[in-house]
Image (cartoon, rainbow, N blue to C red):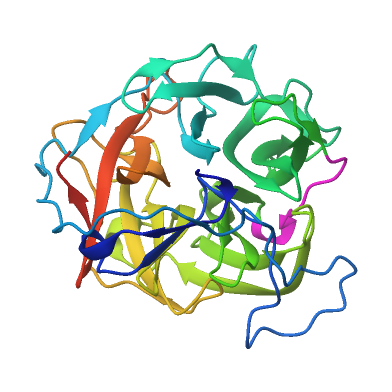
Amino acid sequence: MLVLVAAVIVVGAAVTGGVLLLTGSSSSEAGGERAGAAATTAAPKASTVPSEDALASVPVPPTAPPPPADPAAPAKIVGPDPDQANPFVLVDRGRRYLYSSGCCWDTFQIPVREMTDREGAWGPMIDALPVVPPWAISGKTWGPDARRIAGRYVLYFTAGLKDQPRFRQCIGAATADVPTGPFTPMPEPIVCQLERKGSIDPRTFVDADGTLWMHWKSDDNAEEDGTHASLFAQQLSEDGLTLVGERYEILTADQPWEGRIVEAPHMILVGGRYWLFYSGNWFNQPYYGIGVAECVGPAGPCTKPYSGPFLSTNAQGAGPGESSHFIDRDGIWMVYGPWAVEYEKVTPRPVALARLAFNGDGPYLAAF
């Protein structure tokens, strides 16, 4: 049974013979403080004991690494709606739920659909967050992440911040009893770096010891005169609703293809190696792409093994980005928007599904 907190999967040679811990699609109770991290006096402390479903083993027969995908067309378009930006798949008790932020903003804050089939059968669309928190601008909510923590579901999201002289965004959290909601938002943002023009793109990660982390982006590039954006990491409390401990800046835009931007982080742990996937450059440009870095741990430091993007413009679309990952009994999967938005115009961004595999050199896109 797959769960939403942390998923540890033994996948044999297909993932370098190791163990996979995937952040975003599975759930985990927060675990103890990371070795080497600074002590904290914050009130909510992280749990040191994962719940009974925090580390769910799913044995898979050893297989040879799958062949690489066609680089011109590495994915399948699976989304039922024409515009589902920032896709995120939660796997909970063997069922898959697709959250997004790109469809029907006038009626849905955070759309969610159950994926009754991984490659194309869907349940009805539901608004997971029908009421936004008092600090947020209605209709300006996106970038969802969800997981089951301490017996309930926590939804993380980005939202526009009210009463600001210039548009700013912060990260909120909400809770519900079921994956489709309705989620009840917390009254205040969970992180809001106004000194860095805001905070966006939350993603959670559960380390091998059960420790729960959040990764996100500082929105430094939000204005034309902005600076280079960075990715941050910080541990979450045992209920997933408060950041605790030291904050780490783990990645900055410093390669030409990234422009001034790194965003949409998502970490996975495969065979003892931490891989951080992220998007680089402007989301509305054909230069937008998906990058990857290797990290020492959830708090970094991280290094970029390649001088270019992991996935860039191809025959399926210009400017792919905003990826997240999930696992099921058939493998490791990445969902993303296959092409960039044409700024201030309606640009459909359906959901693309690609298969991830790993060898001694790291991740690659594999054939279905």
Residue 261 placed where, x, y %? 44, 55
Residue 27 visible in image? yes
Magenta stretch: dominant secondary structure: loop
Left or right, 82 with respect to 169, comes to left
Q: Is residue 264 magenta?
A: no
Residue 322 placed where, x, y %? 42, 42
Number of marks in the rendered image:
0
State which region is magenta: 186-196
Q: Nearer the viewer, residue 316 or 344?
A: 316
Quadrant for residue 54, please give it. bottom right
Q: Residue at x 48, y 79 (%)?
A: 301
Give above or below for 147 relative to 57: above
Left or right, 46 with respect to 315, comes to right
Residue 277 placed where, x, y %? 39, 57
Q: Nearer the viewer, residue 65 or 294?
A: 65
Left or right, 198 with respect to 330, comes to right
Q: Is residue 187 magenta?
A: yes
Q: Nearer the viewer, residue 161 or 25?
A: 25
Give above or below for 136 relative to 8: above
Q: Residue at x 64, y 79 (%)?
A: 34
Give above or below for 282 relative to 280: above
Q: Residue at x 84, y 41 (%)?
A: 186
Q: Residue at x 41, y 55 (%)?
A: 278
Left or right, 263 with respect to 216, comes to left
Image quadrant in which the C terminus is located: top left
Residue 82 visible in image? no
